[in-house]
Image (cartoon, rainbow, N blue to C red):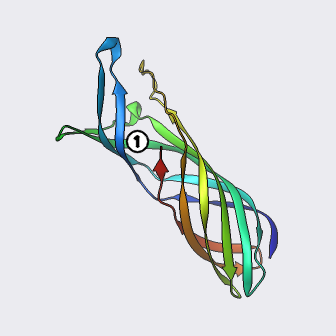
Amino acid sequence: TSGFFIKGGMTMGTTLSFDRYTIVLAGGGGTSTGSATISLDAAPTVEVGWMMMPRHSLGFLGSAVLDFNRSISKATFTENGNTTSLDVADDERASFGFYTGQANIAYRLDRPYIYAGIYGGSRSYNKPSGSTATSILTGGFFGYQIGGGVFILPNLSFEARYRPWSID
């Protein structure tokens, strides 16, 4: 099987962990640094790409992925050993969206296939409506991924992947 494809799915990973963050406080109040864990809602994804996966052979799978905006439901911040957790009300939720490019080497048997590769991309941050805070996100993200799937029909497959995020 080779050619262009379109996939739809759900991103089920619901936690972003930051080993290091810096918040610049309003009004010249200085900065706050520490670590953070953010809980996100699951969200739909759309993937467009090209694959070349002949049966019983090595192949290639490359694509662009859009993870739609994922609302923040809870945030936990740790600074100097002190932890603060915030549950975020529905009308005050900010959200993240992710845009990813990926390239994978695949091996296909008859119907099942596995793949491994690299990805990189950028993200968007949407602050809650009515917020006067400014937010600047810098850097991209990158990493590795592994996955596999099964062709149910010649042009229909079921797939799962593991992709740890590393955000600079």
Q: Toward which corner of the image does residue 80 lie, by quadrant? A: top left
Q: Toward which corner of the image does residue 47 lie, by quadrant? A: bottom right
Q: Residue furthest right?
A: 3
Where disc 1 sits, the SS reads: strand
Q: Residue furthest top?
A: 27
Instruction: Name the residue beneath numbered marker 1.
Output: 72
Q: Residue at x 17, y 41 (%)?
A: 81
Residue 162 in the image: x percent, y percent? Answer: 50, 66
Q: Toward which corner of the image does residue 75 lie, by quadrant? A: top left
Of residue 77 and residue 22, the one placed in the foreground of this image is 22
Image quarter hosting the N terminus: bottom right
Q: Residue at x 32, y 20 (%)?
A: 25
Q: Residue at x 39, y 37 (%)?
A: 90
At label 1, the amino acid type is Ile
Residue 112 in the image: x percent, y percent? Answer: 64, 83
Residue 128 in the image: x percent, y percent? Answer: 44, 29
- Please tell me whether residue 68 is drawn above or below residue 50 in the rendered image: above
Q: Residue at x 45, y 26 (%)?
A: 135
Q: Is residue 15 left or right of residue 85?
A: right
Residue 115 in the image: x percent, y percent? Answer: 62, 73
Q: Is residue 21 left or right of residue 4?
A: left
